[in-house]
Image (tube, helix red, strand yellow):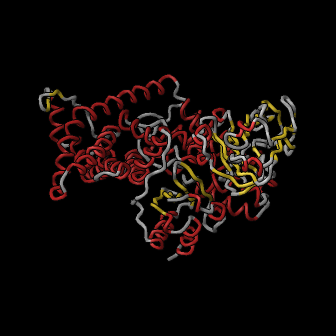
Amino acid sequence: MKYEKLAKEIIKEVGGSDNIVSLTHCITRLRFQLKNEENVDQNRVKNLSGVVSCVNKGGQFQVVIGTHVEDVYHAIMSVANIDGDSSSTPEEKKGPIASFFDTIAAIFVPIIGALAGAGMLKAILSLATTFNWVTPESQTYTILYMVSDIVFYYMPFFLAISAAKKFKTSQYLALIFAGMLVHPTLIGLKDAGDAVSLFGVPMYMATYTSSVIPIILIVYFQSYIEKIAKKISPKAVKTFLVPIITILIVAPVGLLLLGPIGAFVGEYVATFFNFLDQRVSWLVPTLVGAFNPLLVMTGMHYSVGAAQAVQRATVGYTTIYSPGALSSNMAQAAAVFAVAIKSKKKETIALASSCASTAICGITEPALYGVTLKLKRPLYATMLAGGIAGLYAGLTGVKAYSAGTSTIFTLPIYLGPDNSFFHAAITVGIALVLGFVFSYLFHKDEETVEKTEEKVEQAEGIETRDNEKVYAPLEGKTVELAKVNDAAFSTSAMGKGIAIEPSQGVVYAPFNGKVEALFKTKHAIGLKSDQGVELLIHIGIDTVKLEGKYFEALVSINETVKKGQELIRFDIEKIREAGYDCITPIIITNSNDYLDIIETSRETVTRDNGLLTVIK
């Protein structure tokens, strides 16, 4: 097995096969659900030969492999003897927004390949008719177009399967409800134009072919009804009683309520899309073109792609993601190629050349994690060039009439009744030229030389502008904020951050800045960095009750401090003897001012180690 060695190494570093709950993959990443993430040696995973990077997002430990990820996935499945779709452990609790994006991604990721393949077939047929290679009246065209249209026309079936997997309900019952929405009888009743009722209740007759939202709502409702049916059904008759109860409840509710609600939402979404196209058509492609690397980094591009699927189903084309992603991907390919041209280091040249070739094909994760995020300046060049190219695409009304990856080779998906193909080609040219020029001008070769310790401190491979890193104010063991025995800190109500179990009783300034607050009891201090980061350092839990005993403040309010300067001394042993926990939360109280706060992956820190990275 070609990737057996890499598979064994990854399994070992994620805590062994017993620590793996489930494993899936997308185009470039392995996506692990783990029992205990503390068993993962993230830095060792990053440094494995064959691994581009790794991130921990949305309750998943993601290992970026590259375009051969499926081969590595199958190797791990074979070596570890696990089921990628099984899950016996409850999912990590996430906030409503994170849960929403995670759900949308989980439903749409599995069908991306089918959408892209069918979309490209449509694009090829469009290209063939443009050059008169085939006529739309020919049987060959008719049959091939039918094949290309299946995934779009019968979208409820595809979504029913992935939604059922996500909501942990019967896939086969979900397919019944998908078939219910697109059955010829229902379509015939709608086309007849007569009033239709079910159990005497009038039905809203919507068109559900190619729809997205109705089937997701129905399968979500099915997951709850099926659980109830299983609880109340005797074991002897569960085989037929659970399905019939589920069908008799979900089918009427789906046709009378959930389906129409989904249809109404789709109509309003269409209205919103039309408003954007007519009034501010430049806005969305510009934003996606500029910030697509961040969307990819967080996995939110799948959620945006889901919204694009709704747009395609309602108005027949897409402007939400494809034009902006095309701009960004081509800009990133050119930016990385510029690094390969300008660099004098053999390792950088080899890596950048390889990443540029995959990025030009629409697979940007290797370029993102391997080059642009690490070197920073090529990332800025990518975002600037992608934003400008996206602006052009928006101003000229570029529309994608089929699904497909965002790459120069899928330009035929922009063939349609307008000039989208012509302007999409110009968009690609703008992105390639500006991406290369900006990156070549911005890149400095010395930035590729980084120490191993600095890589560890880059918080999942992300390092931002200078002086945006918060260094450790204490020496000791790092602890997740969620594990602090105080709801004000563990729930992140006061802001994002991390905690330290101190090994020495000294608090140091984590950056250059100013003392904004100093409690009379000297157990907590508020600082503000020169760049505006507001930080609270709270020594111990409930130590306010000591009324300053065992604490010594070495600075005062409004005093300017320098990184590494001693701020407070405290007696760890005496505080513990008094019955108090010395664990110290370090909170960025203005977290909402930033895109994200990334914690260090180190288990222990000293005052010279980065603790938190602020993403602006």
Judge left or right: residue 186 versus residue 283: left
User: Eyeballing the image, is 44 above or below 288?
Assistant: below
Q: 35 and 61: which one is in front?
A: 35
Which image quadrant for residue 395?
Answer: top right
**At 19% across and 29% down in the image, what residue appears?**
203
Q: At which x and y percent is residue 184?
A: 17, 42
Q: 582 and 59: which one is in front?
A: 582
Q: Quadrant of the C terminus?
A: top right
Q: 381 and 55: which one is in front?
A: 55
Looking at the rendered structure, the number of numbered marks drawn on it comes to 0
**At 48% across and 57% down in the image, what residue appears?**
33
**Residue lying at the far front of the rendered structure:** 578
**At 39% across and 60% down in the image, what residue appears?**
86
Q: At which x and y percent is residue 449?
A: 79, 58
Q: 158 and 598: which one is in front?
A: 598
**Residue lying at the far bottom of the rendered structure:** 1
**At 26% across and 34% down in the image, what residue appears?**
207
Q: At which x and y percent is residue 253?
A: 23, 36
User: Eyeballing the image, is 17 above or below 107?
Assistant: below
Can residue 372 be spotted in the picture? no
Q: At which x and y percent is residue 597?
A: 65, 42
Can residue 301 be spotted in the picture? yes
**Residue lying at the far top of the rendered structure:** 279
Judge left or right: residue 48 versus residue 510: left
